[in-house]
Amino acid sequence: MFKPRLIHALIITCAVTACRKPASNQAVATSEIPSLVKIGENNFSPSDFADSYEKNKSATDSSKTLSPEEYLPLYTDLKIKVLQAKNEGRDTTAAFNEEISSYKEQLAKNFLVDKPMVEKLATEAYNRLKQEVRASHILVSVAEDASPADTLQAYRAAIALRGRLEEGSDFGDLASRFSADPSAKTNKGDLGYFTAFQTIYPFETAAYNLSTGKVSQPIRSKTGYHLIKVTDKRNSRGMVQVAHIMIRMDSTATPVQKEVAQKAIQDAYAKLEKGVEWQSVVDEYSTDMQSKRNQGLLPLFGTGQMVPEVEEAAFTLSKPGSYSRPVKTMYGWHIIRLIEKKNIESYANMAPSLRQKVVTDTRGKALDLSNAQRLRKKFKTEEFADALKSVSSLADSSLLTGKWDYAKAVGADWSTTKLFTIEQQPYYAMEFLNEVKRIQKNKQKGSSFELVFKKYYDDYLTAKLAQYERAHLEESSPEFRSLINEIKEGVLLSQVMEQNVWQKSLTDSLGQVRFYEKNKANFPMPERVKASLITAPDTQTINAIKKSLAQSPYKLERKGIELLFAEGINDLSKQQNDELSELFAVMKANPDYLVEIAGYRSASEPESMSASRIKNVVKYLSSKNISLIRIIEKDYGSFRPSTELARNRRISFQFFSNSHKDVEKAYNGGGAENVIISDGYFSKENPLLTNVKWQTGEQIISGNNKALWIKVDAIEPARIKTFMEARGSVINGYQKELEKQWLSQLHERYPVKVNQEELQKIKR
């Protein structure tokens, strides 16, 4: 209804991603650059207008392209507003500069990234995603920042192990005996299948470059040196989407709970084998509430992205709709149903996400290195070796524990000691020492403080180069300079519009009323009926809906979890609390829901047992601020025995609702919108009322596979809207009037002169 602060600003600023070509700055006409338009004492060049025209010629109405002549008044009005903002000094305030600095910081990232390198890594990753590699490894541990001597020792140890492999030693045997990876004791170094992005980049690269059966040279990582043996390569299995029925069972489950869980999954499988619908079995048995709400559906996944047992069961299935036998994992029991399999998408589709991934995973180090080399070539840098040597002598072993302090060196004048210069701009040692003190942290055992200090220096130099590039980006990038100029104008425009139009239109209640009284005829209320209506595919469905609506509250098909208790137990376990948290989430997300809590006990338990179980559940929901008026308690005791003995000691849940919209959702299962239930005022223009007779009473209209029931309670004649009914439209109209009045004043202050000859040259 009302335009937010930055909406108007964006009228003159291009969408960031749309800025593809450099645009000239707002230019003062000289003898070389003619003026297209003069506003007050300010001249604007044809190129500035042309750039603005190209970006905004369809902004007001995307169905029509404005001509340069039609766009010129919009352009001059916007420039006049910005000039007024500048004359008020808005572009010199601390708040303005701070806001623009934040935009620069955000937008500069897109201009500073090494796009060719990112594209190269994204393409490489895509090609690797087409293949899955199975590999084993042996890890020789050494700290990332170890001394050269320790690093060499670890490297030689890795070379020695590789020599033994070349002589015929078994890889798995050596891995279980010598690898520093704890899992190698049991898996003999076997990592299973993986693809791109699932391990560190150097390891991934070595694995993909190796031939099957070959062993790599030592590959360095943060944890040490790896010897990698590729044991198999296969084409990508793509992605798979499955649904599951899950019976949760964690590692703390008692023997009774384990028995109950296994019995439940077997019963669920038996029902599927008898032809019972998947959704029905999910609703009855699955205890994974998150997936249960959507027929057990799980997100798409590929190799290495899911629990191994579920992954293998999923990829083994070949026909959509087929399902597995019960599968046990560390989380419980599952029955897996195949929904679909997808091959790897085209590069065009995956490229945006791949580009994002390559800059955030371990490939980032390759980008950092490339960027550091690029910056050192781009800017003239002079380093002072003697100064660095003196500064480096201050480091000691306390640097490895994050407790280093250079206080002992205060006597030296480090604030005037140059470490390096960038384009003759000096950077001094004291700032670097303060930075090291700030960022130092614990290092791996075996790290060398000399090497750590040198890395801090290299990173500091690279950071200062990057900082220098950002600070001078407007000088080196015409495209970035144009974008920032547009952002500045957008912010200024927003500020003056806020003060002179938007805020006043919202707060000036007397002005709103005057505008309404003067323009009442512009706010008509058409003839309407007050009615209730239902649309559905047929009259039979309408009658069923009316019957449902007559109930209060309405019983939903959606059921909640079922909690099973051991004999004589009424306290909630940790697992049951976790399951109740999911029920609470449903109640919180649906404020019109009521929940019926039904308690049961076995005949051998005390009569109060089922009531006690209900009480504990109610207590839990109350602690989560679920009102008691939304809870219905039903104590069935032992009067409804189940053939499954464990289910005789249970709490079950049934949802109800007082909302017509929930009834509508129930009849629109599967996402369809065949049913509409609504009440209120309706005008003749409403498409649902096309064939309705304009009279009170009930009507049923059917045809074209659609039926409508409507009950008209009253007919309201056409009239003028009251001020409160029209207030939103009034404020919008008042905004336009205020802006028109304000612009009239500005045009007197900043007269506009147009160079028609230059305007005709603008490309249409």
Image (cartoon, helix red, strand yellow):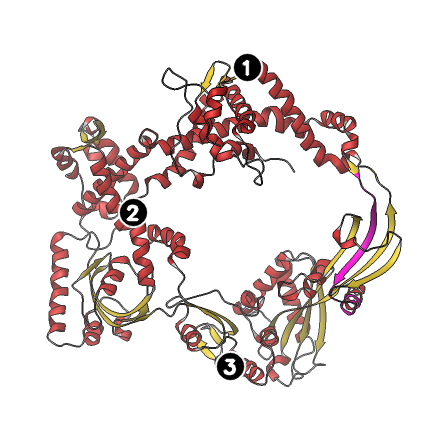
Q: Which residues are magenta?
A: 525-543
> Which of the two discs, 1 and 3, sits closer to the camera?
1
Residue placed most toward the observer, 646 or 665? 665
Asked whether residue 59 appears in the rendered view, the answer is yes
Which residue was labeled with disc 1? Answer: 751
Asked whether residue 442 appears in the rendered view, the answer is no
Hey, what amino acid is under mark 2?
A: Pro
> What separation in Å lies between label 1 and label 2 (alpha carbons)?
48 Å
> Could you tell me residue 54's position as x and y percent?
47, 34
> Could you tell me residue 529's position as x and y percent?
83, 49
Horizontal placement of 180 versus 479: left or right?
Answer: left
SS state under label 1: loop
Decide: is 674 above or below 80.
below
Which mark sits nearer the N-terminus, 1 or 3? 3
Image quarter hosting the N terminus: top right
Which residue was labeled with disc 3? Answer: 262
Horizontal placement of 27 versus 269: left or right?
Answer: left
> What separation in Å lies between label 3 and label 2 (alpha carbons)?
55 Å
> Could you tell me residue 396's position as x and y percent?
18, 43
Which mark sits nearer the N-terminus, 3 or 2? 2
SS state under label 2: helix
Residue placed most toward the observer, 499 or 747? 747
Which residue was labeled with disc 2? Answer: 116
